[in-house]
Amino acid sequence: MTGAYGPLARKEDARFIRGQGTFVDDIAVPGMLHGAILRSPLAHARIVSVDVTAALAHPAVVAVLTGDDLAERGMAWMPTVFGDVQAVLATDKVRFQGQEVAFVVATDRYAARDALELIAVDYEPLPPLMDALTALDPGAPVVREDLPGGNRIFDWSAGDKAATDAAFAAADVVVGCDMMYPRSHPAPLETCGAIADYEAVGGRLTLTVTSQAPHAHRTLYAAITGLPEHRIRVVSPDLGGGFGAKVPIYPGYLCAIAASMTTGQPVKWVEDRSENLMSTTFARDYHMHGEIAATADGEILALRAKVLADHGAFNAAAQPSKFPAGFFHIFTGSYQTRAAYCEVTGVFTNKAPGGVAYSCSFRITEAVYLVERLTDMLARELGMDPAELRMRNLLRPEQFPYTTPSGWQYDSGDYPRALRLALDMAGYDELRREQAERRARGEYMGIGLSFFTEGVGAGPRSQMDILGLAMADGADLRVHPTGKAVLAISVQTQGQGHETTFAQLVANELGISPDDVDVVHGDTDRTPFGLGTYGSRSTPVSGAAAVVAATRVRDRARVVAAAMLEVAADDLEWLDGKWRVRGDPDLGFGIAEIARAAHSTLELPAGVEGHLDASAVYSPPNLTFPFGAYICVTDVDPGTGEVRVRRFIAVDDCGVRINPMIVEGQVHRGLADGIGIALMQSIVFDETGNCLSGSFMDYLLPTSLECPSPELGETVTPSPHHPVGAKGIGESATVGSPAAVVNSVVDALAPFGVVHADMPLTPGNVWRAIQGRPVRTDLSLS
Amino acid sequence: MKITVTVNGTDYARVVEPRLLLIHFLRDELRLTGSHWGCDTSNCGACVVWLDETPVKSCTVLAVMADGRRVTTVEGLPRGGVLDPVQDAFAACHGLQCGFCTPGMLMTARWLLDQNPDPSPEEIREAISGQVCRCTGYENIVKSVLWAAKHDGRAEGGGA
Amino acid sequence: MQVPAQVEYEKATSVEQALALLARYAPGARILAGGHSLIPMMKLRLAQPEVLIDINAITGLRYIEPVAGELRIGALARHADLLAAPVASEHFAILRDAERVIADPVVRQWGTIGGSLCQADPSEDLSAAFAALKGSMIIHGPDGNREVSARAFHTGPYQTVVRPDEMLTEIRLPIRLDGGSAYMKVARRIGDWPIGAAGAAVWLAGDGDRIADVGIGLTAVGATHFVAAEAEEFLRGRPANEETLARAGEIAAEHCRPGSDQRGPADYKRHLVRELTARVLRLAISRARGQAS
């Protein structure tokens, strides 16, 4: 463990344990009005008329905005993060249940809610397209007449088709499966919201908003509103979770901005939970057909996948622009393979837009789920133990850096070691013995493995951009005369602990205490540009920027120290937190003393400026590739279909760990995600277009009783290209865990002949799988 | 309607609509924003406060129902400026990440320890099973409450 | 968060006062007890009463007491009270089984037994438990009290026999010897509404081999009045063995009317009825024989 790294208690906790966090809805400003959105009850309909007369007559209502009002400002439509457009307030049609139709502004939130009922909208219903599998059928309802492709958004492929087909043709064994990764929702506990405050005289907009990417937001608001970017300030205060839900720009934010411009007063809009679940970015919704080809003795030869991606009514998938299917083509996973090919077709449906969210690392959740399910199915087909099959095919340390058949260059890893550790921790052989004994007694337990490789920390800037904004992030470091430092970063924590870990990063480089480093984030007026926090990129990108900036400060400090000691800079070495004279280590100065000198009248060499500040913009040369081995033990009651997760073993490797306590906390969460996603979470629709998962009564989240106490292990394989060898960790467990749970349940049900069952594995779905009549989980039965 | 509610030891007399939810009364009227809300259907528990001696989901209680009663929120946990052991515990054991569910968890943890000074991990999990955390996976919340039980001077001191 | 529509509010400190207010404001008045059934409905604006009559101050309605061979539960008893009451668990394990899986510990502090019953959600657990125990409800009205069997209390989804100017005040459960009871619930997640649940109370004859009397309550599966009447009839007088239990489960499954919804498909719910009915009968019988707790 280096210097300032370690399980340091978090600096940000002091305010949260006192209930003194500042979340968007905690803020009240003088003259603030409250907005509420009228949403479409229909999934697909033409808007005939919108009558707001009665709403305007309500004594507490100050303004009502419709799509036509916004159109006058050029704000009725906005760009999505993936270059499509999305309606802010519908003008011609509504295209998903819950779509925004009108915006009421009132003096209090209760009146705003009441006034929604006074708006009369005349809809002409249209047949809704709710089944993505029929989206490309002739005669399917067309969601986007404004685009030329019908319901087809894109066709994309990666890999070598010819080589893959050849490998499959030559294989001894081929296993294929249709599997769904159901639509889910990140559901951070704090919903989305904003306070827009437009000050007309100076032409300044201040937007306090739940945003994981304040600078990217600012650039987009400038483009949409026509306001100059330097007069827009975006402030993200404390965020109550994000998980990708707070990356996109939502119509409600723009409505609040427009309303503030119209009324001349600050306007707050905060969504309720049903709005959050029904209209903000969903996650996943991939219909996948996967195939794995192998030799008779279990060498994986090739993988093939065909995917239908349901994007909802607008293409708002938040991923780098060159990758319409995100990083799905990492689907060869952690194994040596000779060839791979995947095709992804994206379609529109009459559902809310989104797709990339909920710790997916840009679709790596989908890819890992596919390959880990196929691997288990291959093991079953071959009669091989799934751990043994994996061990046989895992990439070996000497193969790194490894370029996969689909073009990824994995940076470092010792996969077999991680798997062995997980198996030891689980007592794998003992578990298999227990399983056999229980089966003989008519009891069904399952052991499910998942080995995953993640790719996180986008950049590099040449390859990765969102709407043309390259994914490189800045860091500004200032060391004050008394040696206290302030680090301003572009990323935005929603609970990940940046105020602590980034302080540790800088403290470690400068030999000062993390207490002496304050981290500033979330305010575009006070921080450098960057693309924000998602895809586990904070440590790999912004953390690297912070280290580079700190290194520059340290290098500048060397020159200053040399001037203080009247020696040449080369005569100094950095040792134990000070620049010391080589051969005479008692002669030296630490950063605090050097900072004082750098601000003093001390004469500095020609060309060297005073103060002790530095900036960096970091474009990572590659992603970092954390990985892990997970084992999930479940007990299944075949009489009721109930699944209980008994144990979850998780070995993670995220390279160098800055704060192991925080790393483990991230893994704990992701394992809970896996249980929820595998067993209970999904956003479901009926054929008439109703979203049936619009509350926490039906969009079920795991509680403390569903999550066993996790058993964590670690290996550390530094990233060779990251300045301190760290990789990302935030999404790893969400990526790796669902397959472990599903593999476990399917393993438990093997005696019943169950080969696959789609998530969520609710009791009913499990029972139906046992009966040999699995349920289609994304559309509700009528 | 005129109501008087004692919140964290202070009496507040206010005129409110009968439909005003207690959570909004606390947050918007009294500006005690430590308690949060996260759902529409009484499932998430971000709003847990005490009404008299018992924890309640304050999104499912009308402010008028608290007339003449006592409410305790997270702001009322410290005694004489000293944090409650449950508060120290969550900081010591990384029992929070984004902090949004934390006030509700603290109130339930405090109530649990007042009833049961030495709970097992299962009893802790049961006690918080009506409250959602999206960040921690609950493990460190359980550890925090166990830590608080070991370092709890208040339960022995008695009286709320 | 969603918020209720405008409503007026009155507070009652006695049953008489509550009834007077109900009479004055009916039919737009609703009783407000714990509020944990009503207020969520009001927030979603599925219920929009004109007047709420808060009865929480009627402290005399919060009790759980054995009286004259019955366990009498005041309508304002909270779920947590019932779960914690030794006298309830002692005589009716089914109530402890059910309360443990109703909502969550915090909601149970405030939600009331009366409120849950009067909300009459077709998936409400105590309705089935009280039906199995063959309890009765005491309803106070302008013309006095009346007693209604728990097995006739509910008349349809969200509908009971309680008239707009009446109020449920008490639930009575006959305390009988040589009985055992149990409740089992399957849900998509702890604290969720049931996909299907079954409760059984059995009273055995003499040597414990024969079922003298039985009550079976089912919830969430469209069983009329929450009762599996045909299965009860089949079981009466029969030997308490595995074959009988299995057959009872089948009969109960045949006569319920579950619908397919997000919680599960109808065929699965019907299967659950078959499975859970047999399981709760088995456990109830074990308890009646003193072989299980």
Image (cartoon, coloured by chain):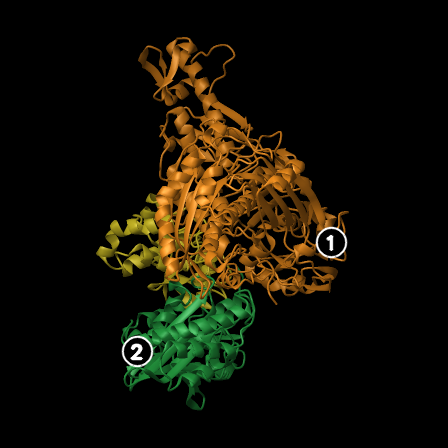
Chain colours: A orange, B yellow, C green
Residue C86 image point, x, y percent: 28, 73
Considering every residue shown, the one lying at the far top of the view is A567
The Cα–Cα distance between marks 2 and 1, rounded to whole angstroms, is 71 Å
Residue drawn 61% across and 39% down?
Answer: A170
Query: Which quadrant of the rendered structure holds the C terminus of chain C?
Result: bottom left
Up the image or down, C159 lies above or below C103; here it is below
Residue B51 image point, x, y percent: 37, 63
Q: Which residue is mark 2?
A: C288
Q: Residues within 10 Å of mark 1 (few under 14, many from 20)?
A: some
Up the image or down, A562 lies above or below A741; here it is above
| Res. C75 in view | no
Q: Which residue is mark 1?
A: A68
Front of the two marks 2 and 1? 2
Residue drawn 41% across and 55% down?
Answer: A634
| Res. A711 in view | yes
Residue A304 image point, x, y percent: 61, 43
Are discs 2 and 1 less than 8 Å apart at CB?
A: no
Q: Amino acid at mark 1?
A: Asp
User: Residue A253 versus residue A156: which sits nearer the camera?
Assistant: A156
User: Residue A234 versus residue A665: which sits nearer the camera?
Assistant: A665
Circle 1 SS class:
helix
Residue A698 image point, x, y percent: 52, 62
Q: Quadrant of residue A510?
A: top left
Up the image or down, A500 lies above or below C214; here it is above
